[in-house]
Image: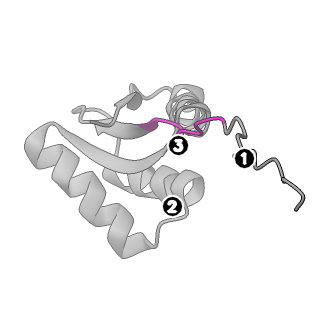
Amino acid sequence: MNETDIKPRTEARPKVERPRLHKVILLNDDFTPREFVVKVLSAEFQMGEDQAHRVMMTAHRKGACVVAVYTRDVAETKASRATEAGRRKGYPLMFTTEPEE
């Protein structure tokens, strides 16, 4: 009889982790017109007008509101572009990002 060497399969499988997500947060201010905030939310975050209005009002009442959750690069880009849209018009509109827990 032939003896067959049996070797266990050992493959190094790298552990792949999902990228950590970051929240984009709209901060309330008392100077940026509500209509402009809704316009920026609709344009940058592809929200319908009703949803953008609800997000804007939540930030108005509570001081801040999570707009969306993305990977870090996307969240930072969207927050920067939305904040810059306000700056171009002379408004203190502010979006920030922070890691999701």
Q: Residue at x 36, y 50 (%)?
A: 67
The quadrant in which the C terminus is found is top left
Q: Residue furthest left?
A: 61
**Magenta stretch, residue numbers:** 14-21
Mark 1 or mark 2, which is nearer to you?
1
Q: Residue at x 14, y 36 (%)?
A: 63
Residue type for callout 1: Arg
Q: Main secondary structure of the magenta part?
A: loop
x, y percentage for residue 19?
A: 53, 38
- In-front residue for pair 77/82: 77
Q: Residue furthest right?
A: 2
Q: Which residue is mark 2?
A: 42
Mark 3 or mark 1, which is nearer to you?
1
Calculate the distance from the C-alpha at mark 2 to the C-alpha at mark 3: 28 Å
Q: Is residue 14 left or right of residue 33?
A: right
Q: Residue at x 17, y 45 (%)?
A: 60
For the residues labelled 1 and 2, say whether their Cβ atoms are less than 8 Å apart: no
Identify whether 34 is placed above or below 98. below
Find numbered disc 3 in the image and state the secondary structure of the residue it sits on.
Answer: loop
Disc ID at residue 81: none
Residue type for callout 3: Arg
Residue type for callout 2: Ser
Q: Which residue is mark 1?
A: 9
Identify whether 7 is placed above or below 96. below
Residue 99 part of the magenta segment: no
x, y percentage for residue 90?
A: 49, 26
Calculate the distance from the C-alpha at mark 3 to the C-alpha at mark 1: 26 Å
Few, some or many C-alpha atoms within 10 Å of disc 2 (few <14, some 14-19, many ≥20)? Answer: some
x, y percentage for residue 97?
A: 40, 29
Residue 17 part of the magenta segment: yes
Identify whether 90 is placed above or below 8. above
Disc ID at residue 18: 3
